[in-house]
Image (tube, grey):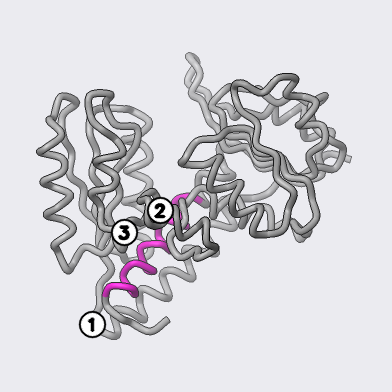
Amino acid sequence: MPAKTIDGIALANKLKQKVKDDVLGLKDEGIAPGLAVVMVGENPASKVYVTRKQVSCEEVGIHSEKTEFTENVDEATVIKKISELNSRNDIHGILVQLPLPQHLNEKKILQTVFPEKDVDGFHVVNSGELYYRENLLVPNTSRGIIALIKSTGEKIEGKHAVVVGRSKVVGKPTAMLLLQENATVTVCHTKTKNLPDFTREADILVVATGVPHLIRAEMVKKSAIVIDVGITRMVNGKFIGDVDFEGVKEVAGWISPAPGGVGPMTVACLMENTVKTCRMQTGALD
């Protein structure tokens, strides 16, 4: 029997409705959540992502604004803008759209964002809190991945979870969250030898590499939960994931599509994090 598809769009819409209700409650208290996005350069994918985030803000009632810099902007200018946003009481969340041009120090710029306004969960303070199981501001994609897995109704505890990819944006925080759910976690990466030997042992397989169709049917355990994070636009304009969806769905128990799986949940979790940062800074009751 083919795998059941995990509907990220439906799950994201449900979460966004909750956020919308929360925003209305905050506005009844005279509080209007605000999100600022800082974008550098003309990366087409970044422009698409930022547009989706702004549309979602409008849908749930969050005020949003965008600052765009040219590709060759100097580091001091970007940092100055972030510092200005840090000081504004009407902006509760700040998002620096990645990737940044190579001449900019990504770590320095991300750490300029105040931890309490770090809606992406990339500041070292929030990363450290994740290590200590204080999960207030966690990277949105990782939070979305856990929500997608839980939506299947399958227990995470005791399962062998394999994460393919070790980025600070997805792989590492996802592994930490899976550990917190009492899974046994293996992290694979570009230097892993004999990758299929690991993926075939996974009850839960999370793939975040950006390598189109890296995972094929023969690399997947029967009835596994497969979460496809990566997405690549091919020369013909078609978007495909890290997982060969058509092949793997004949083996897996559950599978998330790409697009239509992790992406919508990432944006919905960003909306939820913005409400969280707003509550933190205003003292509004949850």
**Where in the figure is residue 186, as x and y percent of width and height?**
70, 39
Within the magenta stretch, is there residue 270? yes
Range shown magenta: 266-281
Classed neighbour count for the residue bearing mark 1: other residues with Cα under 10 Å, few (<14), some (14–19), many (≥20): few
Q: Which of marks 2 and 1 is in front?
A: 2
For the point 50% across and 65% down, which residue is it?
134
Relative vertical location of residue 273 with respect to residue 159 in this rendering, above or below: below
Q: Residue 167 carries which label?
A: none
Residue behind mark 2: 121
Task: Indicate the amino acid at tag 3.
Answer: Pro
Relative placement, left or right, of 148 versus 248 is left
For the point 51% across and 25% down, which residue is it?
232
Tell me whether circle 2 and circle 3 mark residues in contact (CB < 8 Å). no
Tell me whether circle 2 and circle 1 mark residues in contact (CB < 8 Å). no
Residue behind mark 3: 115
Looking at the rendered image, the quarter that the C terminus falls into is: bottom left
Q: Image quarter for residue 25? A: bottom left
Task: Indicate the amino acid at tag 2.
Answer: Gly
Classed neighbour count for the residue bearing mark 2: other residues with Cα under 10 Å, few (<14), some (14–19), many (≥20): many
Relative placement, left or right, of 127 versus 199 is left
For the point 48% across and 14% down, which residue is it?
235
Q: Is mark 1 on a helix, strand or loop?
A: loop
Relative vertical location of residue 105 with respect to residue 235 in this rendering, above or below: below
Mark 3 and mark 1: span between their CA atoms? 24 Å
Q: What element carries label 3?
A: helix
Label whose residue precedes the other's in the sequence (2 or 1): 1
Mark 2 and mark 1: span between their CA atoms? 26 Å
Looking at the rendered image, the quarter that the N terminus falls into is: top right
Label whose residue precedes the other's in the sequence (2 or 3): 3
**Where in the figure is residue 180, as x and y percent of width and height?**
64, 59
Relative placement, left or right, of 89 versus 137 is left
Q: Which mark is residue 30?
A: 1
